[in-house]
Image: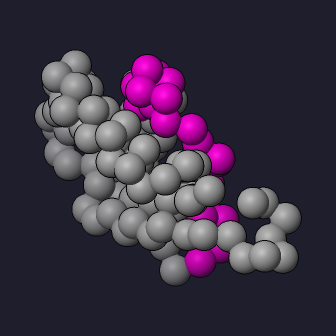
Amino acid sequence: MIVEMRIYHCAPTRLPALLDRFTNTTLGFFEKYGIQQIGFWTTLIGPSNHALTYMLKWESLAEREQKWNAFQADAEWIAKRAATEAEKPIVERIENHFLTPTAFSALR
């Protein structure tokens, strides 16, 4: 198992727009392409409260590449994402980490 941790650093005041986009749009596309989420979190205490952190589960990097690329190339997704950013951009920066569990991890 490979876990992908993605952190979206939003423009100030734009986190609610990102959360709305995930709730009403993105998760439907994840389901369409078989992208499995582990969970989503916002920052309670930390250097920035303008971030969304989420984790995805993959069996291999090949699976990730195939499913993520299909999702990103979906014309309907591209149009809906653009519509949510018509006023101004939502995400300023994305961090992406691929994690593998240790032998003693409860989640493997």
The image quadrant where one finds the C terminus is bottom right
Residue 68 against residue 75 in the figure, above or below: below
Residue 50 appears in the picture as rendered: no
Q: Residue furthest bottom?
A: 47
- The quadrant where residue 68 appears: top left
Give the side of residue 30 with respect to residue 54, left or right: left
Residue 22 appears in the picture as rendered: yes
User: Does residue 28 show up magenta in the picture?
Assistant: yes
* Colour convention: one colour
Q: Position of residue 90 (x, y in %)?
A: 28, 49
**Magenta span covers which residues?**
26-46
User: Does residue 29 show up magenta in the picture?
Assistant: yes
Q: Position of residue 83 (x, y in %)?
A: 19, 27
Viewer-side residue, 95 vs 67: 67
Give the side of residue 30 with respect to residue 94, left or right: right
Viewer-side residue, 64 vs 25: 64
Q: How many marks?
A: 0
Q: Position of residue 57 (x, y in %)?
A: 58, 49
Q: Position of residue 43 (x, y in %)?
A: 60, 64
Viewer-side residue, 39 vs 21: 39
At 58% from the left edge and 42% from the top edge, which residue is drawn? Answer: 37
The image quadrant where one finds the N terminus is bottom right
Residue 102 against residue 39 in the figure, above or below: below
- The quadrant where residue 74 appears: top left
At 53% from the left edge and 49% from the top edge, which residue is drawn? Answer: 58
At 42% from the left edge and 44% from the top edge, which residue is drawn? Answer: 63
At 55% from the left edge and 69% from the top edge, which residue is drawn? Answer: 99
Viewer-side residue, 29 vs 60: 60
